[in-house]
Image: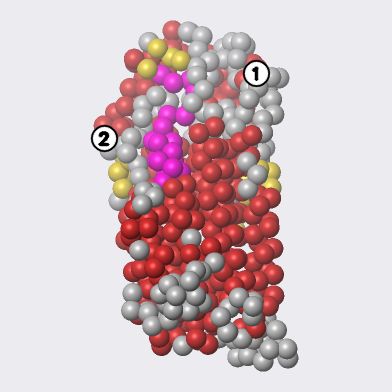
């Protein structure tokens, strides 16, 4: 069980919670902070002080004072009116991540919620109660209002939850556990929906999958490298130390590890003097993506432990400040950057696919890796599919963060669009996984033509893993299912985690 404190949640811990379904708890000190923060809100209500979000309207209605007897209705109306998300729902994993992150923010003790609300969120995670949350409808400032409102609906006994992979009504949910829906108290509705937890949750899930995919791209590239009889001199440490990027050096070192013992790779001048960039520059290209991943990891881990709602309560309620920590610009930039890094892995992978299938470039392999060139097309159209995915990524890579549309009668006149960026980062990563699956499938076929028994021991093991899910091309067939099985294999490895997530 992972103890949340509000301050030190990490991405490896999120991996365990999301994909290992590990339970969570709350450290006593954090719950004490929640209690003290709530006492401050209660005092504000008792003293009838005018404080935004506690006894005022929201957004453009911030100057409208709300009578103390109406504060509960205020929160209920807030949740219902803001639950106007649309489109396909986020994955159940993202929904789970949103609960964890919203809870972790509350545990910092600046949100003013009751301990019972924090306890109910813990219960939802541990019981696998995951709200159905539409993906579209957030501007990424004033927080992820619409998505988080759909999360909050379940707490009050409304909305939908996931059950056995399908949405079902949450009505009667709490009764089945012997519990009652919560009646939200002053500020609690706002504390639930003011925050960046939708974009951050999607960002966390995508990052965890992207990090593993970046590692997988290296052994896939190494398999292609062997099939094309690549020149290993390019991975010499001196080359990369001369430039100085740590990530580039690390990729070169890992590539040498994958290729150690190969009888297929060559040295300078043995077959040719230089390889094409898609082989020669693997450390430079893949290493640059690792620079992106390191940046994104840093920003996500800060945001995972951030107080992003509004207003924030300090000094036992003596200081209540209405600020803008809900603005998603830092995450929006990180997600747009992640899009570029992952799209580039697909770009270079597609170029290696072309080299594997093109008879003018593949060093004597059969044209299109066909068992009977001409009569059978072999892997010809697999390269088309990869090119299509790469082209789609280029359109998705347009930065969401450069856009802004005013809202709430221009009270909220600049927004981040970070949730759109996070969703597009997910789509690009999914596309990139399929491009790399195509490369792995083609590289496995090419390696067999070249002599798989001469590959390095590590690549032979990876080759067997590919063959366990997708057979060789002995005759033309419908290749779509093969690609989906290889992509699913790569995704399953990412969800399994392991020591690879310690890579920096």
**Residue 19, position as x, y percentages in the image:** 42, 58
At label 1, counting other C-alpha atoms closer than 10 Å, the crowd grade (few under 14, some 14-19, many 20 or more) is few
Element type where label 1 sits in the image: loop
| Residue nearest the viewer, comparing 154 with 144 | 144
From the viewer's perspective, is 397 left or right of 504?
right
Judge whether residue 85 is colored magenta: no
Element type where label 2 sits in the image: helix
Q: Which residues are magenta?
A: 294-313
- What label does residue 28 carry, if any? 2
Whether residue 158 is visible: no
Q: Earlier in the sequence, mark 2 or mark 1?
A: 2
Q: How many marks?
A: 2
Residue at point 32%, 39% (across, down): 8
Residue at point 31%, 32% (across, down): 31
Residue at point 38%, 83% (across, down): 263
Residue at point 36%, 26% (across, down): 109
Whether residue 376 is visible: yes
Tell which residue pokes out farthest to the right in this image: 375
Q: Is residue 285 above or below residue 420?
A: below
In the figure, residue 477 lies in which quadrant? bottom right
From the viewer's perspective, is 326 left or right of 386?
left
- What label does residue 387 carry, if any? none
Q: CA distance from mark 2 to mark 1?
A: 39 Å
**Residue 331, position as x, y percentages in the image:** 51, 37
**Residue 470, position as x, y percentages in the image:** 54, 80
At label 2, counting other C-alpha atoms closer than 10 Å, the crowd grade (few under 14, some 14-19, many 20 or more) is few
Q: Look at discs 2 and 1 and give the one toward the viewer.
A: 1
From the viewer's perspective, is 504 left or right of 225?
left
**Residue 161, position as x, y percentages in the image:** 56, 50
Residue that carries the numbered disc 1 in the rendered image: 411
């Amino acid at each position: 069980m992972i103890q949340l404190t509000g301050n030190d949640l990490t991405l490896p811990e999120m991996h365990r919670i999301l994909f290992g379904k590990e339970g969570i708890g709350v450290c006593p000190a954090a719950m004490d902070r929640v209690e003290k923060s709530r006492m401050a809100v209660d005092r504000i209500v008792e003293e009838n002080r005018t404080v935004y979000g506690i006894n005022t309207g929201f957004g453009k209605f911030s100057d409208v004072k709300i009578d103390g007897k109406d504060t509960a209705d205020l929160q209920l109306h807030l949740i219902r009116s803001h639950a106007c998300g649309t489109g396909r729902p986020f994955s159940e994993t993202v929904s789970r991540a949103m609960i964890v992150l919203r809870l972790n923010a509350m545990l910092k003790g600046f949100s003013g919620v009751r301990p019972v609300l924090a306890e109910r969120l813990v219960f939802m995670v541990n019981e696998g109660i995951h709200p159905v949350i539409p993906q579209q409808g957030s501007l990424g400032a004033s927080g992820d209002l619409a998505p988080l409102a759909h999360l909050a609906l379940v707490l009050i006994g409304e909305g939908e939850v996931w059950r056995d992979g399908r949405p079902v009504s949450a009505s009667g949910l709490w009764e089945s556990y012997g519990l009652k829906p919560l009646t939200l108290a002053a500020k609690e509705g706002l504390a639930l929906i003011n925050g960046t937890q939708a974009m951050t949750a999607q960002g966390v899930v995508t990052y965890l999958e992207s990090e593993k995919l970046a590692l997988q791209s290296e052994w896939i590239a190494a398999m292609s490298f062997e099939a094309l009889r690549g020149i290993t001199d390019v991975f010499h440490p001196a080359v990369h130390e001369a430039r100085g990027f740590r990530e580039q050096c690390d990729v070169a070192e890992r590539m040498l590890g994958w290729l150690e013992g190969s009888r297929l790779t060559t040295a300078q001048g043995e077959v040719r003097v230089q390889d094409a960039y898609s082989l020669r520059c693997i450390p430079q290209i893949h290493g640059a993506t690792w620079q992106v991943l390191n940046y994104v990891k840093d920003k996500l881990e800060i945001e995972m432990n951030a107080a992003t709602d509004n207003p924030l309560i300090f000094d036992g309620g003596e200081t209540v400040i209405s600020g803008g920590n809900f603005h998603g610009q830092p995450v929006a930039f990180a997600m747009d950057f992640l899009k570029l890094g992952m799209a580039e892995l697909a770009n270079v992978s597609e170029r290696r696919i072309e080299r594997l299938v093109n008879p003018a470039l593949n060093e004597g392999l059969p044209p299109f890796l066909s068992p009977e060139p001409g009569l059978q097309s072999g892997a010809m159209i697999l390269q088309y599919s990869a090119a299509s995915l790469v082209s789609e990524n280029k359109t998705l890579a347009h930065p969401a963060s450069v856009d802004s549309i005013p809202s709430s009668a221009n009270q909220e006149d600049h927004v981040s669009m970070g949730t759109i960026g996070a969703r597009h980062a997910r789509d690009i990563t999914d596309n990139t996984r399929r491009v790399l699956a195509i490369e792995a499938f083609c590289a496995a076929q090419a390696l067999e033509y070249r002599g798989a028994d001469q590959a390095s021991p590590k690549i032979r093991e990876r080759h067997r893993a590919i063959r366990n899910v997708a057979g060789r091309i002995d005759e033309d067939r419908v290749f779509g299912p093969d690609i989906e099985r290889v992509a699913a294999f790569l995704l399953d490895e990412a969800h399994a985690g392991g020591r690879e997530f310690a890579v920096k």
